[in-house]
Amino acid sequence: MKGYSRADGQLPDVSWFNADGGPIDWNRDDHSLQCLMGAAACAGSARLASRHVLLLIHGGWTPRTFLLPPPTRGIEWRLFIDTGAESPRDIYPAVDGPAPPIHGQINLVDRSLVCYVSAE
């Protein structure tokens, strides 16, 4: 989608979205948002272990469904942190957590955060 990616095909450093996956309206009184942080592109053989990060943040008092934003499609995501889950399903080190649902809808409990990292 226009405005979400740079000319070189890489994700922008930081992009903000609402819970529905659309552009965020900073003037709206909403307790939920998504932050997509694009990993730096690495040139040549000196490739760094950098990964894209997607944060889903929900500060509301009731559960809410999030829809992943369009720029996240085509990226293989793995769950890293889910503050609403019980241990041991709350933290997945080494990028071995589950992928988000195929339909792109993720349910967050009240006052929680979910973090996905790209698999590559």
Image (tube, helix red, strand yellow):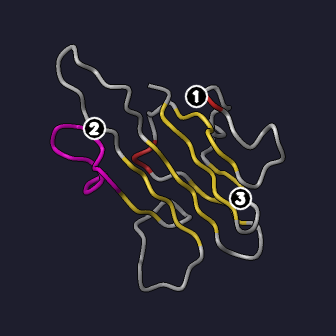
Residue 94: x and y in percent read: 59, 26
Describe residue 20's horizontal placement relative to residue 100 as left or right. Answer: left
Residue 44 image-quadrant placement: top left
Residue occupied by mark 3:
108
Q: Which of labels 3 and 2 is toward the front?
A: 2
Q: Earlier in the sequence, mark 3 or mark 1?
A: 1
Asked if residue 5 is positioned above or below residue 39 in the image, the reply reads below
Q: Which mark is residue 40?
A: 2
Identify the residue at horizontal 48%, vertical 84% (top origin): 28
User: Residue 19: horizontal and vertical position, in percent?
Assistant: 56, 64
Q: CA distance from mark 3 to mark 1?
A: 20 Å
Q: Which sits in the foreground, 93 or 63?
A: 93
Of the residues shown, which amino acid type is indicated by label 3?
A: Leu
Q: Which secondary structure lies at badge 3?
A: strand
Farthest right residue in view: 86
Mark-to-mark CA distance, 3 and 2: 28 Å
> Alpha-carbon neighbours of circle 3 within 10 Å: few (<14), some, or many (≥20)?
many
User: Dot 1 lies on which element?
Assistant: helix
25 or 37, nearer to the observer: 37
Range covered by the magenta-colored residues = 1-14
Counting other residues with Cα less than 10 Å from the Cα at mark 1, is it few (<14), some (14-19), or many (20 or more)? some
Q: Quadrant of the C terminus?
A: top left
